[in-house]
Amino acid sequence: MRRVLVTGLLVVSSAVSSSGCFLNMYSPDPLRRYRQLFFQSEDLRHLEDDIEHFWMIDQPSALSLKRYTALGDPAARRKPTP
């Protein structure tokens, strides 16, 4: 009895796993599915912005003087000729 139960469970699990997801993630209605995919892509875009903000990649570099003043520019350091 145990062997039949285990074999049946194995057959059912392999049939379910090979046929894809049991419940669809998106709606079958094309307009609603488009809206769901659009919102999901916007969420992923915002997540990328949040990661850059967390690691401070979106901030200007504090090591470069060129961004804030003209001190990093060699042309600005030359004295003007009269």
Image (cartoon, rainbow, N blue to C red):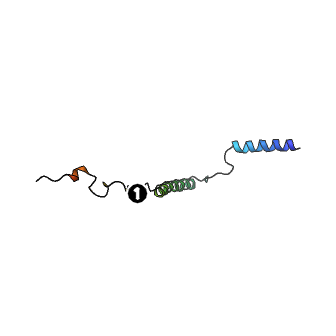
Residue 77 in percent (x, y) is at 22, 53
Residue 74 in percent (x, y) is at 24, 50
* Residue 17 image-quadrant placement: top right
Name the quarter where the C terminus is drawn. bottom left
In the image, what residue occupies the spot 79% across and 45% down?
9
Q: Is residue 12 left or right of residue 70?
A: right
> Which of 4 and 34 lies nearest the eye of the viewer?
4
Name the quarter where the N terminus is drawn. top right
Image: 14 above or below 81: above
* Residue 8 image-quadrant placement: top right
Judged from this view, the residue extending furthest toward the left is 82
Q: Is residue 59 left or right of residue 34?
A: left
Q: Which amino acid type corresponds to the residue marked 1 in the rendered image?
A: Gln
Q: Is residue 58 left or right of residue 70?
A: right
Residue 53 in percent (x, y) is at 46, 58
Q: Which residue is mark 1?
A: 59
* Label 1: how many Cα within 10 Å (few below 14, some 14–19, many 20+): few
| Image label count | 1
